[in-house]
Amino acid sequence: MSNTPNPRQFHIHLVSDATGTTLLGLARACLAQFEDVEPIQKFWPLVRTQKQLEKILTQIQANPGPVIFTLVDKKMRERLQDRADELGIPCVSVLDPIMRGLSSYLGKHAKGVPGLQHTMDDAYFKRVEAVDFAMRFDDGKSFDGLKEADVILVGVSRTSKTPTSIFLARRGIKAANIPLVPGVKIPEEYFELPDCLYVGLSASADRLAELRRSRLQADQNMHGMSKNEYLDLEKIEEEVRDARRLFSRKNWPVINVTRRSIEETSAEIMSYWQNFQDKRKAREANEDSQDSEMKAGA
Amino acid sequence: MSNTPNPRQFHIHLVSDATGTTLLGLARACLAQFEDVEPIQKFWPLVRTQKQLEKILTQIQANPGPVIFTLVDKKMRERLQDRADELGIPCVSVLDPIMRGLSSYLGKHAKGVPGLQHTMDDAYFKRVEAVDFAMRFDDGKSFDGLKEADVILVGVSRTSKTPTSIFLARRGIKAANIPLVPGVKIPEEYFELPDCLYVGLSASADRLAELRRSRLQADQNMHGMSKNEYLDLEKIEEEVRDARRLFSRKNWPVINVTRRSIEETSAEIMSYWQNFQDKRKAREANEDSQDSEMKAGA
């Protein structure tokens, strides 16, 4: 029995003094651009001591392959880089070019302390609170306090409202979601909260039917619909039409999620959200200046 | 009324042909390393056409500041870079150094198609399924099918089991969590599923009391505990001790989350998970070779 090595298979090492989350994203983005490769990803987060680094260097030597890293400590960086050079493997420090750009633009030096982005500051607690919020307001579970939401997603069953809410929450955006279920009437006031950005999520009836079939096997939560109604293609088409009618009556932005990943849908919503906030700021600035004009005139 | 510009305040533009998630992480990591700055972040995801890019260039001109970007299309990259040069602002392509490293290591060219990391492939559906799973098995809501979990988090109330499960899910790891509530008996079998990695989450009683007080204001879900029990410091200390006793009896890794962000806790769990999988693979390989030895001996 021969164990032919696979030339397309190689190890890639992600070494970080913080959580390594960004490295995972970068590796994914870059590796996706190469055909016929089967990377085996080795993930080494929270590397903060020379001793930890030495252990990992042993592992890299055992399974050599490209290294991408974020290490702020100078001594550790040099050690990693030197070792990679000896092993003849590429070793890329991903933050360096950005740090250089910012340093020269700001005329300041970087602090050089690892993991500063993970200080448990206001932004951090805002993100945690937003995840909490998304869980509490998932799937129309609660309407009490809904007006605290930044974004409210509205759509029929299986338009990925839940994972999208969660994704937005991880970015610090408080997202609630309201399901549109035939026969279940939502009080109009919940569709007219003035400080919330509403986004309609839509999808093709075919795709929804497919997702619902597989969902039914996993979970029996039916929102008071019968199984036949839930899966009947004509009924679904009607649901989708009704939903679209609501979105256009309310003049909400609509995203068709049929061929779109959660990440892409969320990115688009974050764009809308930036716009929504910019407009609000402009309006407030305008009101402020009217206020002071009035005072000046008085 | 003078409007003195704030020299610490500046715009930073994140331009991506994909979701820009990684750019947000990179910007956060880098900006955290500079003192006394107040960056205003502008987020431009899903930029795929020359027309979209021109619109953004107008916005960048209106609020000039460092640009960090991921654009795969050569023409768009050049246009952005040229315009930034004209405006005299730094402009950093974050994927380039990694792409170069991988290209030379693999002896292959990158495909140059934007957003390939977001193809809705098996890994994508695995991530979506994992978020679904985390929602279904949150907070001991269900035990039916628990053995499908990759990771099971165990801890007393407010040890951030839920947001940690969600974070792991977004990385494709199926995480369930089981709360330890005084007086609520969990059947022993759920603590002994052989294919799951158990991780105990612990925190200082002081911190838990603080978190629980603020939680109570937001939500009244009490798990059958009385309010006094839930907040009494001595009772909490007892809860924490009992939990730690369980963790050590079961020989589970334990993470103290008191001063740790969700991201850091998750990164540590992902390390444990990598280890757990490596050991399993080694064990399976070992069993395989014993099997073939037996066959050879027969």
Image (cartoon, coloured by chain):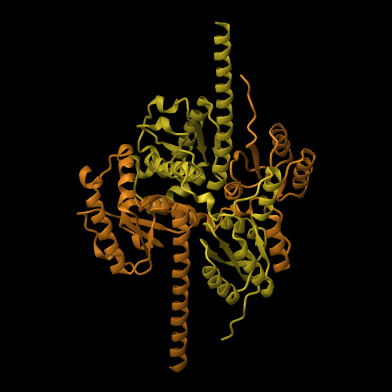
Chain colours: A orange, B yellow
Residue B72, horizontal then vertical, whole percent: 59, 58
Q: Is residue A83 left or right of residue B150?
A: right
User: Quadrant location of the N terminus of chain A?
Assistant: top right
Residue at screen point 43% across, 81% down = A287
Residue at screen point 47% across, 77% down = A282
* Near-viewer residue (B271 or B156): B271
Q: Quadrant of residue A174?
A: bottom left
Residue B118, horizontal then vertical, whole percent: 50, 50
Q: Is residue A12 left or right of residue A234?
A: right
Residue B261, compared with residue A279, is above or below; it is: above
Residue A56, horizontal then vertical, whole percent: 69, 36
Q: Is residue A191 left or right of residue A16?
A: left
Q: Residue furthest bottom?
A: A297
Q: Quadrant of residue B239?
A: top left
Residue B179, compared with residue A264, is above or below; it is: above
Residue B30, compared with residue B53, is above or below; it is: above
Q: Residue furthest top?
A: B298
Residue B193, compared with residue B165, is above or below; it is: above
